[in-house]
Amino acid sequence: MRRGKTPSGHQAVTPHPSPFTPHGTLYIVATPIGNLEDITFRAVRILKEVDLIAAEDTRHSRKLLSHFGISRPLTSYFDHNKNLKGSYILEKLAAGESVALISDAGTPCISDPGYQLVRDAVAAGIPVVPIPGPSAAVTALSASGLPTDRFAFEGFLPNRQGKRRERLAELKSERRVLIFYESPNRLLSTLADILELCGDREAVVARELTKVYEEFVRGRVSEVMEKFQERTVKGEVAILLAPAAAPEKGDMPSVADLLQKHMLSGKLSLKDAVRQVALETGQPRSEVYNEALKLKGKVGPGSGDREAGTGDREPGT
Ligand code: SAM
């Protein structure tokens, strides 16, 4: 592959590992999340040069590729064939062929298939080269108006409401902006859970980024909900949540204090007290459980032990 400098002194070519490596290179190529103009020159060049393109959905990607006049051999790589196809792709790479991985939109491996392939390629000593481009999370954050210095990407919350609420409870004290991906039909119920578990803080819903109907809905969680309640939510959405406020000194009772309160009340079993305190504090259940076991001896037999004899198992085991 050619090397050279642009007039500005930037490197104009893809870094290539030692020419002596017998392996081909695996390129992780980002593609647009809506607007086709967002593909990079480098992405187009790499996609035109590789021996094989592995795409999450070949029918979907064929449209993108033909738009840019790219006609390299195409194969599928998605969640349900990733073991079989992963081996096939690794064989090609080991034989010296170069492969580009693309997903339906945005950056592969970011809430999209690819992680396992990259891991296996790295383990096999195959060079992995990222070709950067759009990702909905960073695109949404950049124009959200929320602080951008620290953020945490949470991807999709669990589908099941119980698990989703548990995750939100763990996150409620997070001091960084949180970014979630969500489907439009779950947007309102997820916002309702966020409101209940994380409070009515500032939030932004970024919808249809880079597309014709792109919009940012900003406000408190309750205000954002109101705006979406009036209509059917369509298209792709990402939710951004402002950081939790710093707790005032002395505001937060400790895990031990809360456990003691619930265990002494005699109303909750140990397991329920642990679940309740994990929800209230956002601490992982396993940690709260360990604290509860330490307290159990001190608080006395019977307290918070309505299930004694049934064997309190560590939550989630
Ligand atoms: N790999 C992609 C990336 O780099 O952003 C994400 C793929 S994930 C399967 C799809 C989710 O990303 C959507 O459900 C939505 O939450 C978010 N997303 C993708 N495109 C978007 C867009 N144009 N506007 C808003 N959110 C988008």
Image (tube, rainbow, N blue to C red):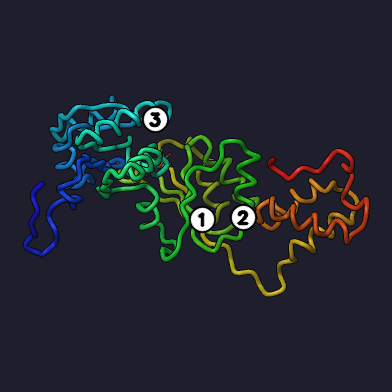
Provide the secondary structure element on which disc 1 rests. Answer: strand
Q: Quadrant of residue 251?
A: bottom right
Q: Position of residue 250 (x, y in %)?
A: 72, 73
Q: Which residue is mark 1?
A: 241
Q: Is residue 124 above or below residue 78?
A: below
At x 39% / y 26%, what residue is drawn? 81
Q: Earlier in the sequence, mark 3 or mark 1?
A: 3
The amino acid sitting under disc 2 is Cys
How many numbered marks does the figure carry?
3
Q: Earlier in the sequence, mark 1 or mark 2?
A: 2
Split into quadrants, the picture shows ligand 1 in the one at: top left
Nearest the camera: 169 or 284? 284
Q: Quadrant of residue 51?
A: top left
Q: What residue do we see at 24% from left, 38% from top? A: 100
CA gap, disc 1 and disc 2: 9 Å
Mark 1 Cα shell of 10 Å, populated few (<14), some (14-19), many (≥20): many
**Which residue is the site of mark 3?**
82
Disc 2, SS? helix
> Going from the N terminus, do you reach mark 2 or mark 3 first?
3
Secondary structure beneath dot 3 equals: helix
Amino acid at circle 3 = Lys
Q: Position of residue 29 (x, y in %)?
A: 26, 43
Question: On the image, numbered disc 2 is attached to which residue?
Answer: 198
Position of 271 with respect to 153 (left or right) is right
Q: Is mark 3 within 8 Å of ligand 1?
A: no
